[in-house]
Amino acid sequence: MTTLETTSSPYVLEDMAGHVLWLTLNRPRQRNPLSSAMIAALKTAIDAANDNPQVRVIVITGSGPVFCAGHDLREMSRREGESDKVREARVAQILRDCSKMMLGIVHSPKAIIASVQATATAAGCQLVSACDMAIASQEAKFCTPGVNIGIFCTTPLVGVGRNIHRKHAMELALTGDLFCADDAVRFGLVNRAVPAGELRADTEQLAQKIASRSAQGIRSGKEVFYRQIDKPLEEAFEFANEAMLDAMRSADAAEGSKAFLEKRAPRWSDA
């Protein structure tokens, strides 16, 4: 592949399998960095999927030997003749855009799974943490190495620190070390690690299972989960109780109960 072909190819590849949309970060030679162009392409793809009723589950994966290397340090470096003020404003915009994209994953009405085939670094770990679930190859590794270059992975730790215990999060951040997939499972960043050759099939099986559930139930349930999780316990129960009552009034709830009693597969309203 020529350089021209590489730079002109889509930043994110899209592949639909039934009701599951696979989004593949497609800059393997550059280690799939979250450049401004990659962030924009991923956000655009997710926004379009959110509006597509045929998409029930989104899977995010990477091409090549790295899942995602985090932010593009070349892009964030000072350009020739650029003042500190201009550079800081430009980098601040990249960080804001990345945060919006991550929030878009959390707030998406679709279930989103990270299928981590290789190393996830810094904001690449943040991308994994933003997804509802994650499955990793046993060959995958994870790190937040900002400390190695004199900074600290503060924004990646917003997501990572909400997935894993703070002491594990600080170990990642303070050492900058690579952690294996089994550690990522133990820490809570990843649901499970599987042999590399089984990653695609295992992820597909999980995604198709979720896609067979009520999209209405998943849409409302995901929103409620993320809204209640940071509330005080009493408020969380009250909020969840109201949401449960609302869900029980839905057509899919009635169909699900009826199908269970009749020992048949449910026919969801948005199937």
Image (cartoon, rainbow, N blue to C red):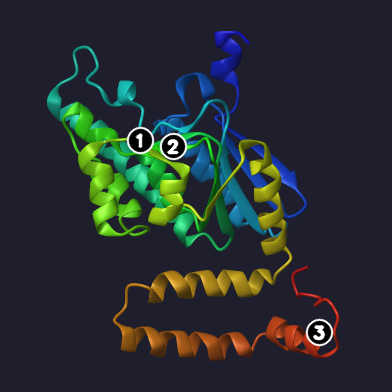
Q: Nearer the viewer, mark 2 or mark 3?
A: 2
Q: How far is mark 2 from mark 3, CA to CA?
A: 43 Å
Q: Position of residue 51 (x, y in %)?
A: 62, 57
Q: Position of residue 121 (x, y in %)?
A: 38, 35
Q: Which mark is residue 259?
A: 3
Could you say which is closer to the camera, residue 253 or residue 4? 253
Instruction: Kindly check if marks 2 and 1 are in contact, taking CB atoms under 8 A apart as contact.
Output: yes
Q: How far is mark 3 from mark 1, CA to CA?
A: 48 Å
Q: Residue at point 38% right, 50% down?
A: 100
* 74 to 194, vertically: above or below: above
Residue 56 located left or right of residue 37: right
The amino acid pointed to by label 2 is Lys
Q: Residues within 10 Å of mark 3 (few under 14, many from 20)?
A: some
Q: Residue at point 32% right, 20% down?
A: 74
Residue at image mark 2: 141
Residue at image mark 1: 178
Residue 21 located left or right of residue 193: right
* 134 to 63, vertically: above or below: below
